[in-house]
Image (tube, grey):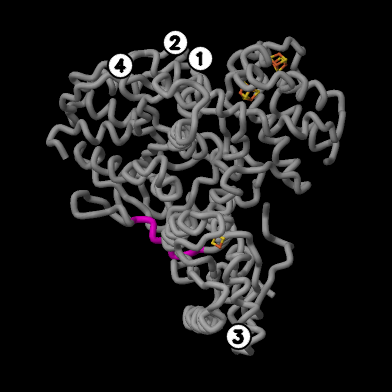
């Protein structure tokens, strides 16, 4: 690993300004469970030019890239950017993490980067919904929910419904979205395991294909796709010529403009702010405003919510282990403790990880954690006025 | 990990293209079935590279995708007949997983026909040879793995 590479990273992410205060370590959810993990030390060792530090080598994969620390740091160090840069350096040396499912999801994403395969990704489209395959004003970026629902059929099969739910919502608001047959994975996971080359290939394909449709707006359901486009694509390429919005913002605006009405759902729910939508993108209010527009729905906040929300315990499939499981169980306990019947969230990964936590034996009484984990987009689709 | 620069098993492109097939065979049944096919001198094509696993339930979806990523044109998984698995239900799990894997291959545009799951016991040497012949022909019809750029970048 070249020394100037590290220096450049330290420079770019502001890690140079770190005063070793340790605030990052004090708020880090990973450090609560892994006492050997201290974000501060990773920065300090890099600053001191310590190369090939065994703890760093391990700890860059312990970090959940949740950005809890970024917001706390008095010197505005872009901590997650720093971790991401380190991961890319390690990846280039062939030092890769042990990923869950043997790396299945990453392989799937690399295959999409490698060749232009003629995908069959629109198996969920049927006559109930209206889409366009090439031209329009608004594009729905569907992401990997459909594929993930297939892979995790035993845990989160409901993910297969997410793209269709999103189209139903858009249709109900009078929009016929463009949905691409040759959309590829946004590349989020590959970027966060350090495989920048494959990430860039995916990015170029998506940007080129979306530009060709001439759309003015792209709507996302997945917080990771949303962040990847809005932050990373614009960082690695240039400003994108379309507006990017999260579906919660879209729905909120449509309700405000009187284009969308939601019908009664009698249910008590709680909401989990995923790190990408919350801390990374700052979207806290729109989902809550949408929930308050559903008559009959009672939303109960968890104690650790908004910027204090904890993590689902896994990032980019790279750190599914004991501590992640503990984190999930604790979060589910907290959610169940609110008395809600279900915990809503937008992130398909959070949903899979939380479902996984209770899929097999759990270390606590099952009635403490057996809260339903529900996809937010699916719930809104259920609340559409005409019942469809 | 990027597959660039890694040595890929495989076929040469164009004219002389031959299907390159990876078969994951369960130790307790079809691997022995392959032996029996051998000693009985049943002929089957040389395109198959057999990898022994302790049970068809050991085969992860990732094994199939990774083999294809590295240039295999087809992937075969063979195990004990239902009810005969040495570990009771490994093959039942394999059945569920491989169905999901096939669905995934279809979505990705690689095609579900590039993989197959078969039950072949230790006494079915003839069935082993027949399956290998049939699957090789099927892959020959399908042509090279689209990921290898028409067979060009493997080998
Ligand atoms: S990004 Fe999250 S897990 Fe990583 S060091 Fe910061 S607070 Fe800890
Ligand atoms: S909070 Fe910021 S300044 Fe303090 S130790 Fe962490 S990175 Fe350094
Ligand atoms: S032991 Fe042969 S399939 Fe399980």
Mark in the foreground, 2 or 3? 3
Which region is colored magenta? A116-122
Residue B134 is at least partly visible in this image = yes
Q: Residue at x 63, y 62 (%)?
A: B53
Query: Circle 3 marks a residue in which chain?
Result: B
Instruction: Judge left or right: residue A333 versus residue A84.
Output: left
Query: Percent x, y for residue A7?
Result: 81, 31
Residue A256 forms part of the magenta stretch: no
Instruction: Judge left or right: residue A312 versus residue A76.
Output: left
Mark in the foreground, 2 or 1? 2
The residue at which mark 3 appears reads as B45
- Few, some or many residues within 10 Å of mark 3 (<14, 14–19, 20+): some
Secondary structure at badge 2 equals loop
The residue at which mark 4 appears reads as A299
Instruction: Judge left or right: residue A170 versus residue A281.
Output: left
Residue A145 vertical position relative to residue B121 in the rendered view, above or below? above
């Amino acid at each position: 690993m070249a020394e100037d590479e590290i220096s450049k990273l330290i420079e770019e992410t502001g890690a140079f300004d770190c005063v070793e205060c340790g605030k990052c370590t004090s708020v880090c959810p990973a450090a609560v469970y892994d006492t050997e993990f201290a974000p501060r030390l990773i920065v300090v060792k890099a600053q001191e030019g310590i190369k090939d530090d065994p703890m760093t080598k391990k700890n860059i994969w312990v970090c959940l890239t949740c950005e809890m620390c970024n917001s706390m740091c008095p010197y505005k160090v872009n901590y997650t950017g720093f971790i991401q840069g380190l991961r890319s350096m390690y990846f280039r040396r062939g030092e890769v993490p042990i990923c869950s499912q043997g790396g299945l999801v990453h392989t799937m994403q690399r295959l999409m980067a490698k060749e232009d395969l003629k995908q069959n990704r629109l198996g969920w489209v049927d006559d109930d919904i209206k889409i366009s395959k090439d031209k329009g004003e608004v594009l729905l970026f569907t992401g990997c929910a459909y594929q993930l629902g297939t892979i995790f059929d035993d845990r989160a099969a409901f993910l297969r419904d997410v793209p269709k739910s999103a189209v139903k919502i858009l249709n109900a608001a009078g929009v016929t979205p463009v949905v691409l047959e040759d959309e590829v994975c946004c590349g989020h996971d590959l970027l966060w395991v350090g495989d920048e080359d494959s990430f860039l290939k995916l990015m170029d394909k998506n940007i080129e294909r979306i530009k060709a449709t001439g759309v003015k707006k792209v709507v996302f359901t997945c917080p990771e796709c949303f962040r990847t486009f809005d932050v990373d694509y614009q960082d690695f390429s240039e400003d994108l010529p379309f507006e990017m919005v999260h579906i919660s913002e879209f729905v909120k605006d449509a309700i405000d403009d009187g284009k969308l009405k939601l019908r009664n759902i009698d249910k008590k729910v709680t909401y989990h702010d995923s790190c990408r939508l919350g801390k990374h993108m700052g979207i806290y209010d729109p989902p809550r405003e949408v929930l308050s527009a559903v008559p009959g729905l009672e939303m109960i906040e968890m104690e650790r919510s908004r910027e204090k929300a904890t993590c689902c315990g896994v990032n980019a499939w790279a750190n599914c282990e004991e501590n992640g499981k503990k984190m999930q169980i604790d979060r589910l306990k907290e959610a169940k403790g609110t008395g809600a019947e279900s915990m809503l969230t937008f992130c398909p990964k959070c949903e899979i990880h939380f479902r996984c936590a209770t899929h097999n034996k759990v270390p606590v009484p099952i009635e403490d954690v057996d809260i339903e984990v529900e996809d937010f987009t699916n719930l809104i689709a259920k609340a559409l006025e005409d019942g469809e | 990990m990027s597959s660039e620069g890694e040595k890929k098993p495989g076929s040469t492109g164009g004219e002389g293209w031959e299907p390159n097939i990876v078969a994951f065979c369960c130790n307790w049944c079809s691997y022995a079935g392959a032996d029996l096919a051998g000693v009985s001198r049943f002929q089957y094509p040389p395109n198959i590279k057999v990898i022994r696993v302790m049970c068809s339930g050991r085969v992860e979806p990732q094994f199939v995708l990774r083999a294809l990523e590295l240039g295999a044109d087809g992937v075969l998984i063979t195990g004990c007949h239902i009810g005969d698995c040495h570990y009771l239900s490994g093959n039942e799990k394999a059945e569920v997983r491989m169905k999901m894997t096939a669905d995934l291959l279809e979505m990705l545009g690689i095609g579900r026909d590039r993989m197959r799951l078969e039950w072949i016991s230790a006494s079915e040497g003839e069935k082993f040879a027949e399956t290998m012949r049939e699957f090789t022909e099927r892959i020959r019809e399908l042509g090279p793995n689209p990921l290898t750029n028409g067979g060009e970048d493997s080998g």
